[in-house]
Every structure is written in C-alpha cells, then in structure tokens.
Amino acid sequence: MQELSGAVAERAPSARMSGYAARLPAPALLAVSAVFHYLGPAFAVLLFARLDVFGVIWLRIASAAVVFAVWRRPWRLWRRLTAAQRRVLLALGVVLAVMNTTFYLAIARLPLATVGSVEFLGVIVLAAVGVRSLRNMLALGLAVVGVFTLTGIRLGGEPIGFGFAFANCALFMLYVALGHRVATNRSSSSPPWGGVDQLGAAMLIAAVVTTPLGLARAAPAFEHPGWLLAGVAVGVCSSVIPYVSDQLAMARVRRATFALMLSILPATATVIGLLVLTQLPTVNDLLGVALVIAAVAIHQQPTRNPDRKETPCGTPV
C-alpha cells in the first residue's frame, strides 16, 4: 500500500503538469509558439555580430538538446519505439538541424518579416491540401501573390538569401508533417507528454548533426559568458518553448487546422522584427503580409467525417 502511495505521489507533479497543459486551448499554445518562434531568432541576429552564423545555430540546438536531456531524458523511450517510429525521429532530427541552419542563413541576409512570410507559404500549402476546393485554391493564389509582393522587388539583390528562405519554407513543411505524426501517432496508453519526449530525442539527433560545422565556430562563446548565456537563451526561446507548444497543439488538432492557425506567423515576424531589430516594414512588406493573412482568413477548414472517430489526441490528415 505504501509503495502504491509513493508511486502515486511520484507521478503527481507530472500529472498536474500534463493536466494543466491539456486545459490550454490549441490557439493559446500556437500564440506562445508564434511569439517565441521569431523572438529567439531576433536575439540570434544580434549575436551574429559576435559569432559566426553556424556557431549561433549550434548554440541554439545544443542548448535546447541539453534542456530536453535534463528535463525529459528522452533516451528512455528509444527501446519502446517501433522501427518506423525511430525512422520518423531520425528524419525529424535531421530536418530540425537543416531547417534551423537555412533559417539562420536567411535571416542573416534578409529582414525577419520577409523570411517569416516566405516560410508561411509552405504552411498555406499544407492548409490548402486539407480540403481541395476552389476556395482553397483562391487562398493559395493570394498567398503566392503575397509572398511575391514581399520578395519580387528584392529578389535580384539577395538571391542567396531568398534561396535559403525558400529552402527553409520546404523544410518547415516537413517539420509540420513529421511533428504532427509524432504528436498523434501514439497509443491511448502513452504518457501525455510522449510527443514532447520524442521531440527531445529528435533534438539530440539535431545536435549531433550540427556539431561538425558548428562546435568550432561556437568556441569563442565559451570565453565570453555573456555570449554563451545569450546563446542558451536563444536555444530556449527558439527550440524549446515554441516546439513544445507546437507538439501540445498538434496533439489536439488536425494537421490542416494546425497549419491554418499558424496564420499569425507573418504578423508576428513583422512585429518582432520592428521591436527587437528596428527593421521598419515597407508598404510592400505590409501589403504582402496582409495578402498572406487574407489567404488564411478565407481558407476553408476540413470538416470531420462523422463515420470516422477522432482520438483524444486529434486525427492526422
């Protein structure tokens, strides 16, 4: 009896944490994710004056991996995963590493709002695929026009930057697809934070992938505690808070709906670029962001199939 009471007491903090997270609505989780999704990179841009871009990338991913290792100890779940689940985690880890690298290489050359809006084009595609209709085709068309408005005039001046931005866009689509699979491909007996544990394992893989290029270039930070603390803060703001929020939200909604709710990304990038980096948006920037957001506003959400039962976690599209 004492052993049972001890086990219940031991699980209580985790149960309270998961219960509190379960009460948060998906839009609230997405709002948290959107703010930190660009707040961390905005601070990273300030670090570019002191460290090589690849060094900042490594500090971001490595510090996030350390946080997940201490908090979740994700290696414990590896034996319980199937071969297919392990392959998904390996793929997610590589995608996180390459996606963050292309994103940072893009924001080192382009305004944060521009990169954010290009990134959002992939999200619109995922949302439009959820329901095939003329209305969603119109939404996709508006998104394309919006991104062209943001990028077309400056494309000749920074082709490399836009190349990295569009590569990041494609990788962000993969992140959403793989992340949603991790969040929803769990049995009813799985712990509520199982998706976050798998995310932590993927982050450890991402740290391994980025180490060859980034560790040596991050070395100067170890001689300057302020730089190192800034790099750790970037990791927590960029790769822990938003990705955990994403996992919890993905477990509640369909993939197309999750993509739809990311409509606040371009606006968030514009506001944070203005407040943190004093990057003043032009009229074309504002028009492009408005068109992208309008595309999401007219997007039609998928209707549930009454013959198809949805799990408590949500059903992937």
Image: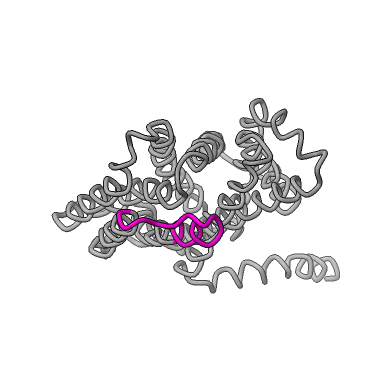
Which residue is found at the position 49% from the left and 36% from the top?
Answer: 102
Range of magenta residues: 268-284
| Rendered location of residue 213, percent (x, y) | 64, 27
Note whether 249 is above or below 20 in the view shown.
Answer: above
Instruction: Describe residue 121's horizontal placement relative to residue 177 as left or right.
Output: left
Note whether 232 is above or below 216 in the view shown.
Answer: below
186 or 100, which is in the foreground? 100
Which residue is found at the position 36% from the left and 56% from the top?
Answer: 282
Specify the farthest residue to the right: 2
Q: Is residue 223 magenta?
A: no
The image quadrant of residue 169 is top left
The image quadrant of residue 298 is bottom left
Note whether 126 is above or below 79 in the view shown.
Answer: below
| Rendered location of residue 204, percent (x, y) | 66, 39
| Rendered location of residue 212, percent (x, y) | 66, 25
Instruction: Describe residue 28's horizontal placement relative to residue 63 as left or right.
Output: left
The image quadrant of residue 297 is bottom left
Instruction: Describe residue 134's horizontal placement relative to residue 161 as left or right.
Output: left
60 or 104, which is in the foreground? 104
Is the N terminus in the top left, top right, bottom left or bottom right quadrant? bottom right
Q: Is residue 271 magenta?
A: yes
Specify the farthest residue to the top: 212
| Rendered location of residue 108, percent (x, y) | 52, 40
Instruction: Describe residue 189's horizontal placement relative to residue 250 as left or right.
Output: right
- Residue 293 is at least partly visible in this image: yes
- Residue 198 is at least partly visible in this image: no
Which residue is found at the position 71% from the left and 49% from the top?
Answer: 232
17 or 108, which is in the foreground? 108
Q: Main secondary structure of the magenta part?
A: helix
Which residue is found at the position 76% from the left and 39% from the top?
Answer: 221
